[in-house]
């Protein structure tokens, strides 16, 4: 059952703090779901999770320029605030924070969060600017809102691990919680960027998760990890993808697995992560191994 009510939209940090201060003064908890908008059922599953975990839900919508390189899709990234708010009005969302770039990065802004550990490798090799941009904006959002809980999708698994790591390292009080990846009926992970796919590419895109699942089965079946990964990369290429990586990593530290084969005890402790281009769209996905 869904119920509709009027949404409160805060555009400045001062307005946001007035809302959260009132909740805090009443001793009420709130969970935050940071997003870049163009909301789909994956985002909304995190909103539902937030509803179940706190008295209030706070959603932020901000397309963060700092996490896009100059050659990336910042300008074309879908911006659908009105539709997003309509979708959110069916949930128990106490406020939506929609700042503009000047509010988050006023002139003279010059501070960034530097990262090591799980931020090394994988996405960083192909998008070197990315995690510093994410960490800086997430830190700012969590300091501005000071939620009890902040929820991020496992869809962006490395991002989730990076946020958990720097939140712990910087003593950010919010509890960082992951939410499962929502998928289309055929298995493709939902993503705002799926909107870039042509009809033909959309049909082909499912091969990413299909090949990842096949790779998982091979590893579970005892095939040497490097052979399973090599075959997976070859399969991706033969299906028209240009893979950035297909990698088996330890789930917590995200260090690459060097073992020849996985033992039964290692099942459940590793993650298979992939990023691949299909035409002009970059898709990422991950599954537990
Ligand atoms: P984005 O708007 O793409 O920055 O995503 C906002 C949040 O939604 C991030 O925590 C993502 O990991 C999460 N998210 C994106 N796609 C999905 C999905 N298919 N299922 C669950 N969470 C998702």
Image (spheres, grey):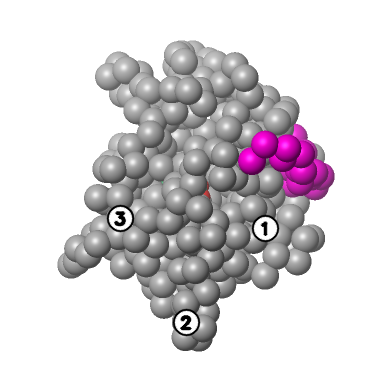
Q: Where is residue 157 in the image (x, y as percent from the top left)?
A: 59, 47
80 horizontally vs 280: left or right: left
Circle 1 SS class: helix
Crowding around mark 1 (Cα neighbors within 10 Å: few <14, some 14 to 19, many 20+) is some
Q: Where is residue 76 in the image (x, y as percent from the top left)?
A: 43, 22
Circle 3 SS class: helix
**Depicted 236 relative to depicted 225: above or below:** above
**How far apart, in angstroms, are the residues tagged by discs 1 and 3?**
26 Å
Q: Name the residue under label 2.
A: 28
Q: In which quarter of the image is residue 276?
A: top right
Of callouts 1 and 3, which one flags the residue occurring earlier in the amino acid sequence?
Answer: 3
Residue behind label 1 places its C-beta within 8 angstroms of ligand 1: no
Q: Name the residue under label 3.
A: 88
Identify the disc placed on residue 164: 1
Labels 1 and 3 touching (C-beta < 8 A): no
**Depicted 73 relative to depicted 159: above or below:** above
232 horizontally vs 248: left or right: left
**How far apart, in angstroms, are the residues tagged by discs 1 and 2?**
24 Å
User: How many numbered discs?
Assistant: 3
């Amino acid at each position: 059952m869904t119920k509709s009510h009027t949404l409160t939209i805060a555009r400045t940090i001062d307005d946001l703090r007035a809302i959260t201060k009132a909740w805090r003064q009443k001793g009420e908890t709130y969970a935050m779901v940071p997003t870049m908008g163009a909301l789909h059922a994956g985002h909304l599953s995190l909103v539902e999770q937030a509803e179940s975990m706190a008295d209030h839900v706070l959603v932020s919508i901000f397309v963060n320029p700092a996490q896009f390189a100059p050659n990336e899709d910042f300008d074309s990234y879908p911006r659908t605030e009105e539709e997003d708010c309509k979708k959110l009005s069916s949930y128990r969302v106490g406020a939506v924070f929609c700042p503009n770039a000047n509010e988050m990065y006023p002139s003279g802004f010059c501070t960034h969060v530097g990262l090591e550990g799980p931020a090394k490798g994988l996405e960083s090799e192909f998008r070197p600017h990315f995690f510093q941009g994410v960490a800086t904006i997430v830190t700012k959002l969590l300091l501005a809102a000071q939620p009890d809980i902040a929820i991020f999708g496992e869809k962006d698994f490395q991002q989730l691990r990076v946020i958990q790591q720097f939140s712990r390292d910087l003593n950010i009080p919010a509890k960082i919680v992951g939410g499962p990846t929502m998928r289309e009926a055929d298995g493709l992970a939902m993503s705002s960027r799926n909107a870039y796919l042509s009809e033909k590419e959309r049909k082909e895109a499912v091969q990413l998760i299909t090949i990842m699942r096949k790779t998982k089965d091979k590893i579970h079946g005892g095939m040497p990890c490097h052979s399973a990964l090599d075959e997976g990369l070859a399969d991706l290429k033969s299906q028209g993808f240009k893979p950035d990586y297909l990698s088996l990593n330890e789930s917590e530290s995200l260090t690459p697995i060097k073992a020849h084969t996985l033992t039964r005890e290692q099942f459940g402790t590793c993650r298979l992560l992939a990023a691949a281009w299909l035409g002009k769209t970059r898709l990422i996905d991950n599954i537990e191994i």
